[in-house]
Amino acid sequence: MTSRVESSLQTQLDRIDRVRTARLARAILRDEHITLSHGSGGKSTHTLIDALMVPAFANAALDGFADSAVLSTNGVGSPRFAFTTDSYVVSPLFFPGGDIGSLAINGTINDLAMSGARPVCLSVGLILEEGLEMDVLRRVIASLAAASAAAGVPVVTGDTKVVHRGKADRLFINTSGVGIMRDGLNLSVESVRPGDVVIVSGDVGDHGLAVMLAREALEIEADIRTDSAPLHELVAAILAAAPNTRLLKDPTRGGLATTLNEIARHAGVGIAVEEEKVPVKREVRGACEMLGIDPMHIANEGKLVAIVSAEEAHAAVDAMRAHPAGVGSAIIGEVRSEPEGMVILKTPIGGSRVLDMLVGDPLPRIC
């Protein structure tokens, strides 16, 4: 039995190595200038990162396909910690259900949580454009403080810079966060294997569409609000119910489709998703149909994807549904051995199609 398990693990590791080698080999940056698509989280973003960033900064901590770097001091038995950073350039600054301030706090907390860390502190860096209204800054600072207090994760350091008028778009925020890793926990793409179950914690597409409607002032009568929320307590509930959870990811830029493709490509597996099981609000689906946008490509800021073993799947879903941030949780698919690096969407009429990651950038500056 032991040799069989070891053989299966080695097969999975070999598969991952092949996919990584192929991914890096085909990452060729042909663009001569940066475009908005490079910030979309989709194919252009991945090409930019794989072809330019990864080779330049290559190291073990950076190679883990995680939302945070998991590190430790050199002392024997010293605790591991997670570190992450993110920048927020969302436009407009205020949108239904949230704003750039609460988004920055929640997003950074979630990056730590997806690594299985317990967030302990944050930093906030502000880049302010000359001419920014002081009332706007007061509102954003109040939102940052309120979101930090509500999550129980304090802002302990920061920085403020001012640039000339026209050199920024009113206000940008950079946040970093530190969290303490749980003992013995190792969420990683290497642990994802065929037979695992894919769970999403609720309706997808809310955040990106809320921002888009606010930005473009489209005359669509729909009560669509951002789903921005901290997820660290939901993650704690998942890990308590399903301690062998393989991987957690938050489907932000590029949406659910891009996140699932990232997992499939890095893990060297196939993922099959049942379209009718993916939860989408009626208002979001209707607005997406009018605009010609797939809700699976739209950013989320308060949802997560969990890859768990089949044996722990129902326990995980029950725990998620018992938490306010996961009441809409649903099993949407499974991990398969083939086709490597691809996501297949099974349609309600019995057919199937390839669900690719986001191409282009229909929704720039969503976070």
Image (cartoon, rainbow, N blue to C red):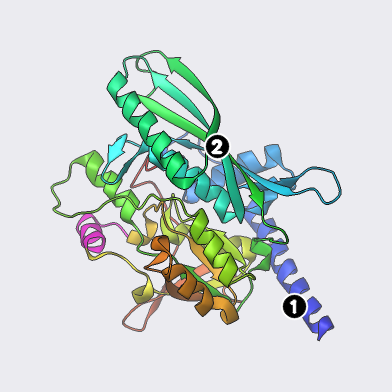
Q: Which residues are magenta?
A: 283-294
Q: Position of residue 17 (x, y in %)?
A: 72, 62
Q: Say whether residue 193 is magenta.
A: no
Crowd around label 2: few <14 · some 14–19 · many ≥20 (10 Å): many
Q: Is residue 252 above or below residue 146?
A: below
Helix, strand or loop at mark 2:
strand
| Residue 248 found in image quarter | bottom right
Q: Could you say whether the residue bearing mark 1 is in a helix, strand or loop?
A: helix
Magenta stretch, overall SS: helix
Picture residue at 62% right of the left edge, 52% below the top: 117
In front: label 1 or label 2 = 2
Residue at mark 2: 122
The front one of 35 and 197 is: 197
The residue beneath circle 1 is 8
Task: Establish if 275 lies above or below 363.
Answer: below
First reached walking from the N terminus: tag 1 or tag 2: 1
Q: Is residue 348 above or below residue 149?
A: below
Q: CA distance from mark 1 to mark 2?
A: 40 Å
Q: Which amino acid is tagged 1?
A: Ser
